[in-house]
Image (spheres, helix red, strand yellow):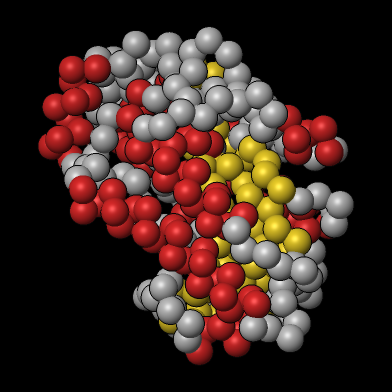
Amino acid sequence: MQNKKIVIAGGTGFIGESLIDHFGSTNRIIILSRKPQPPRDHVTYAYWDGKNIGEWAQLLEGTDLLINLAGKSVNCRYTEENKAAILASRIESTQVLGEAVKQLKKPPTLWINSGSATIYRHSEDKPMDEFTGEIRNDFSVQVCKRWEQSFNDIRLTATRKVILRIAVTLGKQGSVMIPYLNMIKFGLGGFQGSGRQMYSWVHVTDLARMMEWLYEHPECSGTYNCAAPNPVTNKAFMTSLRKATGSSFGLPAYTWMLKIGAQLIGTETELLLKSRWVIPTRITHAGFTFQYPELPAAFQQIISELPRKQYKLLV
């Protein structure tokens, strides 16, 4: 993609920064954020609250690609207050973008709304795809279902719509790599829980490439799993990470340990213990190929761009 106008709602986090790296040099990018930053290169920032139509709405006029990443982080304790905020932040941002798009004379060509691969049930028995995946009713699944429904309820005649059910995303900019590498540094890079739970993942480069590919293929719309085609067990994930960082050992963290640790750092064990076995059937059948289909190569690329102090074993 070149010389396109790209608007990213909620684009100041890890994925947003990665998309700027991918698209920024040859495209105009506008980031909608509650905490705008000074402009840089091809990137400008505009304030929005994720709830109400404001001056930001006119910036969507003539957009080629609209990407919505907005939503409160799930890396928190699931108190009633946090659960309400997690759900509201996703639904409200989606709905207000829909209101804004409907008012435009020249609406976006493509709107990609983020979703989550955690919409599928805990699965250690079989993989889940867009056709056969089973959806249950725990809190996280309910958030994903209502999030997607709020997007699907928006009827647009001139804008193509796509949902990406994004797996755990790996990249040098941060996100899950930070706590995992910290565990490696202190010799705690063994498996978590039983180690048998499946781990679906995607390299952030492939996430950006998939968005670009979808823009370039107007025949594609609807829901796609954004996950590498070769998920692994948690034990294999941690073994591969230790190998990539040159760590010779890693102590495991059993379920009872994780429950205590989650309370201490203010998060939920689900983020480590849920078995996400998700495969990208629709996008691969459509013709997309992954640059990083296998985990070892993905880790090698990420580690090669990080200073040793971020993963060097300290014990």
Quarter of image, res 300 = top right
Observer-nearest residue: 309 or 150? 150
**Residue 74 drawn above or below residue 3:** above
**Residue 91 drawn above or below residue 174:** below
Residue at image location 78% in from the left, 58% down from the top:
215
Residue at image location 55% in from the left, 50% down from the top:
148
**Residue 308 drawn above or below residue 239:** below
Question: Can you give x and y, in whole percent of width and height, for residue 273 in the image?
Answer: 35, 23
Horizontal relation, residue 99 to residue 37: left or right: right
Q: How many marks?
A: 0
Horizontal relation, residue 156 to residue 100: left or right: right
Residue at image location 56% in from the left, 83% down from the top:
57
State whether residue 22 appears in this view: no
**Residue 140 drawn above or below residue 259:** below
Observer-nearest residue: 175 or 106? 106
Quarter of image, res 282 = top right
Question: Can you give x and y, in whole percent of width and height, for residue 140 in the image?
Answer: 39, 38
Residue at image location 74% in from the left, 86% down from the top:
105
Quarter of image, res 101 = bottom right
Observer-nearest residue: 98 or 45? 98
State whether residue 152 appears in this view: yes
Question: Can you give x and y, in whole percent of width and height, for residue 216 in the image?
Answer: 83, 57
Position of the N terminus by quadrant: bottom right
Question: Can you give x and y, in whole percent of width and height, for residue 137 in the image?
Answer: 41, 32
Position of the C terminus by quadrant: top left
Horizontal relation, residue 155 to residue 93: left or right: right
